[in-house]
Image: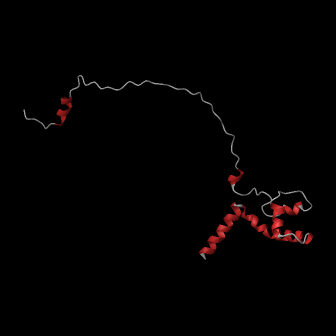
């Protein structure tokens, strides 16, 4: 039962967020192929698909019927990101400024610095 519910929700999700809803128009492909087959007995299914999908959408006698085939018209209710239009890029030109700074080597002077003073802090207390 859990598998059935998960397949149901997955199907609803796919049909609402992708163009998988176009697969529901699949019977129209076979009906339209049958119409073409009645006009031309030698037409194969691959020739039919080639005529309708590989050569754009020419305005012929059955143009309205052709536009009812799956994946022929864009769907505007797909993912919201598909309708997103990126803003024009903003270019900022900053002047190139170079600073050459000469650093002096850091030298410590130990004049007037008594090392014995700080080390006396860690000595044990002395009895006077």
Measured as percent of width and height from the top left, residue 72 is found at 80, 60
Q: Is residue 28 or residue 6 the one in the foreground?
A: 28
Q: Residue furthest bottom?
A: 1
Measured as percent of width and height from the top left, residue 85 is found at 71, 47
Quadrant where the image shows the C terminus? top left
Q: Is residue 68 or residue 98 the one in the foreground?
A: 98
Residue in view at x 67 percent, y 68 percent: 11
Residue in view at x 65 percent, y 35 percent: 91
Quadrant where the image shows the N terminus? bottom right
- Which quadrant of the structure image shows residue 51? bottom right
- Which quadrant of the structure image shows residue 32? bottom right
Q: Is 100 situated left or right of 113 in this image? A: right
Measured as percent of width and height from the top left, residue 120 is found at 17, 33
Q: Tell me how the rendering is colored.
A: secondary structure
Residue in view at x 18 percent, y 37 percent: 122
Q: Residue furthest front?
A: 42
- Which quadrant of the structure image shows residue 112? top left
Q: Is residue 60 or residue 15 the one in the foreground?
A: 60
Q: Is 6 situated left or right of 69 in this image? A: left
Residue in view at x 69 percent, y 60 percent: 17
């Amino acid at each position: 039962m859990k598998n059935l519910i998960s397949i149901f929700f997955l199907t609803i999700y796919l049909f609402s967020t992708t163009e998988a809803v176009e697969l529901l128009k699949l019977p129209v492909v076979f009906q339209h192929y049958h119409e073409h087959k009645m006009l031309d007995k030698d037409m194969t299914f691959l020739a039919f698909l080639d005529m309708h999908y590989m050569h754009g959408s020419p305005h012929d006698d059955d143009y309205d019927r052709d536009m009812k085939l799956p994946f022929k018209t864009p769907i505007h209710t797909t993912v919201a990101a598909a309708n997103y239009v990126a803003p024009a890029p903003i270019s900022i030109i900053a002047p190139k400024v170079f600073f050459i700074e000469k650093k002096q080597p850091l030298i410590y002077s130990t004049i007037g610095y008594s090392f014995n003073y700080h080390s006396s802090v860690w000595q044990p207390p002395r009895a006077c």
